[in-house]
């Protein structure tokens, strides 16, 4: 199943927030029971750490995925901006007409708006739900 980058980013951020909340609750419960630790408490802390380890790993992976998505979006934005600059240079040198420039610029600006999510659609041009 393919998810649009902005939808995937939103889901990942939501999941990261939920995991942070779960991990914080686990850490708070450990701090609240920070009286004189007995051998039983140390075993419980170890068990808590073991149970939370997959969540820490998942949180790490999700952060890396989110970082990769953000880097990809930034690279796409830079590519569109470079295309816009080249388009302006072509107009200035007379290589293209004003009408051709306007049409191509409109397409690039729409792609940039979709990428940034400023027009109510995702990067694929589909309406947000």
Image (spheres, rainbow, N blue to C red):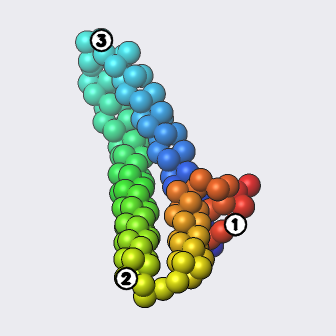
* In the depicted structure, whether residue 72 falls above or below residue 32: below
Q: Secondary structure at mark 1?
A: loop
Front-most of 32 and 127? 127
Q: Is residue 80 left or right of residue 116?
A: left
Front-most of 63 and 85? 85
Indicate the position of residue 109 as horizontal and vertical percent values.
Answer: 54, 66
Please, which residue is most extreme toward the bottom here?
A: 95
Is residue 68 in view?
A: no
Front position among marks 1 and 3: 1
Residue occupying image coordinates x 53% and y 72%: 105
Q: Earlier in the sequence, mark 1 or mark 3?
A: 3
Residue position for label 3: 35
Asked which quadrant contains residue 117, the reply is bottom right
State how far apart marks 2 and 1 are (Cα): 36 Å
Please, which residue is most extreme toward the top here?
A: 35
Asked which quadrant contains residue 42, the reply is top left
Marks 1 & 3, CB-CB < 8 Å contact: no
Image quadrant occupied by the C terminus: bottom right
State how far apart marks 2 and 3 are (Cα): 76 Å
State how far apart marks 1 and 3 are (Cα): 55 Å
Q: Earlier in the sequence, mark 2 or mark 1?
A: 2
Front-most of 120 and 80? 80
Front position among marks 2 and 3: 2
Indicate the position of residue 74 as horizontal and vertical percent values.
Answer: 39, 61
Q: Secondary structure at mark 2?
A: helix
Front position among marks 2 and 1: 2
Residue position for label 2: 93
Q: Is residue 50 left or right of residue 12?
A: left
Is residue 129 in view?
A: yes
Residue occupying image coordinates x 52% and y 39%: 18
Indicate the position of residue 47 as horizontal and vertical percent values.
Answer: 36, 37
* In the depicted structure, whether residue 58 falls above or below residue 43: below
């Amino acid at each position: 199943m393919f998810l649009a980058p902005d939808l995937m980013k939103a889901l990942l951020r939501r999941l990261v927030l939920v995991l942070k909340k779960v991990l914080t609750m686990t850490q708070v419960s450990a701090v609240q029971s920070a009286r004189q630790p007995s051998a039983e408490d140390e075993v419980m802390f170890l068990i808590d750490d073991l149970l939370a380890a997959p969540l820490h790993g998942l949180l790490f992976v999700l952060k890396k995925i989110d970082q990769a998505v953000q880097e990809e979006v930034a690279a796409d934005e830079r590519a569109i901006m470079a295309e816009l600059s080249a388009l302006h240079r072509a107009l200035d040198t007379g290589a293209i007409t004003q009408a051709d420039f306007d049409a191509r610029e409109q397409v690039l600006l729409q792609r940039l708006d979709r990428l940034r999510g400023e027009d109510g659609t995702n990067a694929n041009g589909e309406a947000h739900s």
